[in-house]
Image (tube, rainbow, N blue to C red):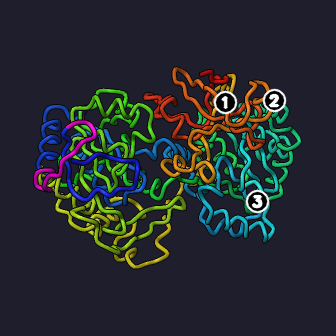
Amino acid sequence: MFEPSAGSNRIKRPMRALEEGKFVEISWADALREVGFQLSEYARDDPEMLGFIGGEMVSNESAYLFQKLARLLGTNNVDTTASLSQGISTEAVLEMDAWGHWAAFTDIDGADLIIVWGADLAGNYPVLLGRIARARERGARVILVDPVTGRTSKFADFHLRPLPGTDVFLALSIMNRLIKTDERFGAVLPEDVLGLVSRFPPSYGEELTGVQERVIDAVAGEILRSSHGIILWGSGVTMNENGASCVRTLITLTFISGMKFLPLSRYGNSQGVLDMGLIPNLLPGYTALCESGDFQKAWLVEGLNPHPGKSLAEMLDGGTGVFYILGADLTSSIPGAIDALRNAEFVVLQDSFMTETAKFADIILPSALIYEEGGSTTNFERRVLWCGKAKRPPGEARGAVSILGEIGKAMDLPSFGYTFPEEVLREISLLVPGYPGPRKLVGIPEGVLLERPSRAKRRFAPITPSRPPQGEMLLIRGHSGRFMPGLLARRMGEADAALISPEDASRLGVSSGDRIAIEVGDGRIVARAKISNRTLKGVVVVHWDLVRAALPLEPRRNFLVSKACPCRIRRDEP
């Protein structure tokens, strides 16, 4: 009998649940038969009861097959955890047809202005930070926008510290100053966007964000003097109430200034799984569901479901009877996941490790890591990279492509006779614009940089920010680095710490080490106070592991607020 643990234990054999969190090993034949039977039964009776959720570290090939399996079973209920962050940026780029402004890493090397917005480069992107540091040595100016100070701050010429959730108003104020300084910037904007920008002069921006008017003016001046600028943004931009509006605003800023942008993804293949169609309303390559003709021919079917499926949040909100989870630890990252999985009638987990999500599975399928199978990924530069098979997977673990191929064949699905990732990549190259086939990718260390042509005319999207977050205290997710994710943070004793400013500590009458209670909506968490000048007055920084259960997930918008939440804080009395 086996029980999931928080460690990095590899799954080596298929397993069936005896009860929640307790498993017995079974044969591959039995596991595949059970999964195929359950999926077939639900697909026949009501495919809308099926839900497919993929992670952000699976290969392009397995992600492509995963969504193909879902769609051949009649459902578009397929999504990825990447939709909660990188998906917000990608959706805006699609909406505004801004592919031509998407930067490559080499654009950083030649930049004279680099703006890093809402990203902890030192903790999450150290190689990229090194590249930016070298560009700065060559004369590039670096601007950091982040409420919290840290190791990245020392690489910046300016460090702007807006109140969490007010980034969009800061960006609008910067644009306002640009337009007031040079009317040519405003001449290209549609009336609705120009009218919105005119409402946020730097003086009002200071009132909303806490960033001084003179600093906003200085940043606008840097942009005016720049000829090769680039904006990089991370989850600090996307994962707050105004995330989508802020991304649209930053893209609009690149349109009028001639800068480029680079959305930073959280994991190794966050961009790739989106390209592969782990999206409920789009097929691979961001093809509309109503334009599925090429896919029908390739997949040997007549007709695919043309109706958008449920988003990740909608699937977790109820009504999903069967979950198939591919390489995603939902219960560690998504509020509401535990209840959804407990209430489901059947849960399949295909993964390499015994994660916290594993305890809620009915069948566990042990999957190889990408270097144990081979496959491609697409980084946030939109460069496709091939990883060759370097070793065998442990025990009876199999490649993800092989597992999905066997399930498809067991259900007699057409065009599902896959064994190797190269076969899937060949099909991807025929259906997804720009993606290379095996001959152009396998064995090419530098990979292939995707190019997606933009239309001649830019499309400006509406910017509709809501009011800044209100509350006694604001709560933002802890950065990695010092605030480390998951198990490592728990081992190092940081997971239950809450950074608060000296001013707030004095007001609350707490010292470092005292227990404080933080209420977010209906949720309540208890943390150890850690007094620090790294955070702003009125802002408490709490590690993700501590706060995840209390954060709101909004099903209608597929939206997880984790960077700026209204909250209440007080001393915790025993």
The vertical placement of 561 against 100, above or below, is above
Q: Amino acid at mark 2?
A: Glu
Q: Position of residue 84 (x, y in %)?
A: 48, 41
Residue at which label 1 appears: 474
| Residue segment shown in magenta | 19-31
Residue 305 lies left or right of residue 506; in this view the side is: left
- For the point 36% across and 33% down, the residue is 338
Residue 266 in percent (x, y) is at 52, 52
User: What separation in Å lies between label 2 and label 3 (alpha carbons)?
Assistant: 27 Å
Q: Nearer the viewer, mark 2 or mark 3?
A: 3
User: Residue 155 shows which numbered tag?
Assistant: 3
Q: Residues within 10 Å of mark 2 (few under 14, many from 20)?
A: few
Q: Residue lying at the far right in this picture: please name it.
A: 214
Give x and y (percent) for residue 8.
39, 56
Residue depicted at 28% across the width and 64% down the height: 424
User: Which mark identifies residue 207?
Assistant: 2
The crowd level at tag 3 (other Cα within 10 Å; few <14, some 14-19, many 20+) is some
Q: Are the residues at dot 1 and dot 3 in contact (C-beta closer than 8 Å)?
A: no
Residue type indicated by callout 3: Phe
Q: Is residue 445 above or below residue 220?
A: below
Q: Marks 2/1: CA distance?
A: 16 Å
